[in-house]
Image (cartoon, rainbow, N blue to C red):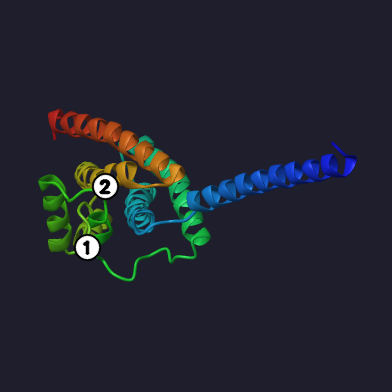
Amino acid sequence: MSLRIIASALIVLALAAAGGVAYKQLREMKSAQAATTATAIDIGFAQSMHAHHQQAIWMSQLLLDGRPTQLPLLAKSIINSQLIEMGEMRGWLNLWQQPLQSTSQSMNWMLLGDTAPDPELTRYLLACKNSKTGMVGLATSEDMNRLRTLDGRARDELFLNLMLVHHEGSLPMAKFAAAQSKLPAVRNLAVRIAMDQSEEIGLIKRMINALAAKPH
């Protein structure tokens, strides 16, 4: 075999190898791009949970306004953990060039999963639709005003009951995003929120029972 033929064969092999590397790199680039491309589920979850967290922080800050409370550690824990999570969601929405707040109160992003909504999810979405705030668990302006005006034990009891409903209202969102999001970062945060708030629900229920057992 002549040197020219050998050289030509080597060039062909080199080009083929280069082409294979380029194809692999292109696939990896597309895969990386897909991993940061948000769907309506990711955007809806980030916007809705951001709003949910924001109100929980407001309620907790009201409890820490300097008046006596038996719940400072719980309020501070909610503020600290949810500020961090809000920062993550705010960062995603900025990356995706999406507003922090949805243009509507609709929770229709939870209709976009891989399967049709089951009865539990259907009931949740109907409850959101019928809610004054557009989401289950969000306190109304009347609730917030009561939290501002009450004092002492009555305020603590109202805070616990509002926060219990608040946390329970966020669980379906978190569980849905954990199951349906295609982005690992979104799934991981949704799982963490579901776990943390489930634990706090148990803690809040024990605190409610403890307050009820105390004599007035």
**For this view, does 141 lie left or right of residue 87?**
left
- Depth check: 145 or 164 in front? 164
Q: Which residue is mark 1?
A: 133
Residue plotted at (26% across, 31% down): 203
> Furthest residue to the bottom?
103
Pinpoint residue 160: horizontal percent, then vertical percent: 23, 42
Q: Of helix, strand and loop, which one carries label 2?
A: helix
Residue plotted at (34% across, 35% down): 196
**Which label's residue is closer to the chain start, 2 or 1?**
1
Q: Which mark is residue 28?
A: none
Pinpoint residue 117: horizontal percent, then vertical percent: 17, 50
Residue plotted at (16% across, 62% down): 129
Pinpoint residue 122: horizontal percent, then vertical percent: 13, 52
Q: Is residue 72 at all visible to an observer of this figure?
A: no
Pinpoint residue 107: horizontal percent, then vertical percent: 24, 60
Q: Which residue is mark 2?
A: 170
Q: Real-space Cα distance between discs 2 and 1?
A: 13 Å
